[in-house]
Structure formats: structure tokens, C-alpha cells
């Protein structure tokens, strides 16, 4: 299963979002059984980093089942807790999509929300 994650922060420019997404990918690869790769456009413009829609977008692929969702939930909680202006969009292949932000959800509620979307068959 592939999950598309997009990091959004109105107070950060494209370079900062790009940096956040690289850091987020590294943490996911280190602390979870997911692979994380940059979302790529089908026809990128030479010399450009990407358009504002794809900058900060990551594709996650689950490598295992046991504990994968729990490990990923811990990463999300930690990352949102450290980045108060950050919103994370999570989109499943079946088009279910949620947005998690420290502004619209309490860190303690993140676990239930992510468990629901990540473990849904």
C-alpha cells in the first residue's frame, strides 16, 4: 500500500518545506518499516525543484504489517509536536484523505485518527 504525505506550512518558503520533507523522509526510514521517497512529477521542468503542489510531498510504502502503523503514528506525533505551524495531509490509494495539524487536532488525538486511516483495509 502506498500512502501520499504532503507537508504544508504557511510560514515556510519552498526551500524550508523541501528541507522539512527530506528530514521527515529520513526519520520515517530510520524509525519505521516504511520506505519513503519523494513524489515525482511526470514531466518536471529542468532546473526546477518542483511545483508548489509536489514540493513537500512524500510517498510511503509499507514493508511490513506488525507495528508499522504504530511506528509511523509515533513519528507523526513527534513531528507535529515540534513543528507547530505544520499541517500533514495523508492520502490513501482509495482516495481517503485527512489533514492533521497542531491547530486542528490535539496530539493525543493523532493516534486514533492515524490508526483509523493507516489500518483501514
Image (tube, helix red, strand yellow):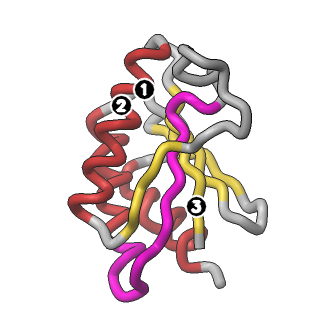
Reading the image, the residue beneath label 2 is 20
- Please give the name of the residue rendered at 37% of the width and 57% of the height, measured from the top-left corner: 108
Determine contact: label 2, label 1, CB under 8 Å.
Answer: yes
Q: Residue furthest front?
A: 46
Q: How far apart are marks 3 and 1 (CA)?
A: 18 Å
Residue 17 in percent (x, y) is at 44, 24
Residue 106 in percent (x, y) is at 43, 47
In this view, 15 is above or below 62: above
Reading the image, the residue beneath label 3 is 3
| Image-based side of 14 in relation to 84, left or right | right
Q: Give the secondary structure at mark 1.
A: helix
Q: How far apart are marks 2 and 1 (CA)?
A: 5 Å
Residue 2 in percent (x, y) is at 59, 66
Residue 20 shown in magenta: no
Q: Give the range drawn in magenta.
A: 54-70
Q: Which mark is residue 18?
A: 1
Residue 61 shown in magenta: yes
Residue 77 in percent (x, y) is at 34, 52
| Image-based side of 116 in relation to 36, left or right | right
Amino acid at each position: 500500500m502506498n500512502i501520499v504525505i504532503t507537508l504544508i506550512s504557511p510560514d515556510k518558503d519552498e526551500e524550508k518545506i523541501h528541507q522539512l520533507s527530506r528530514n521527515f523522509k529520513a526519520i520515517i526510514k530510520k524509525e519505521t518499516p516504511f520506505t519513503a521517497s519523494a513524489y515525482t512529477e511526470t514531466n518536471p521542468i529542468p532546473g526546477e525543484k518542483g511545483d508548489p503542489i509536489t514540493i513537500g510531498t512524500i510517498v510511503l510504502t509499507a514493508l511490513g504489517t506488525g507495528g508499522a502503523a504504530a511506528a509511523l503514528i509515533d513519528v507523526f506525533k513527534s513531528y507535529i509536536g515540534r513543528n507547530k505551524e505544520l499541517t500533514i495531509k495523508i492520502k490513501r490509494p482509495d482516495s481517503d484523505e485527512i489533514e492533521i495539524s497542531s491547530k486542528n487536532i490535539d496530539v493525543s488525538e493523532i493516534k486514533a485518527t492515524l490508526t483509523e486511516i493507516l489500518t483501514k483495509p
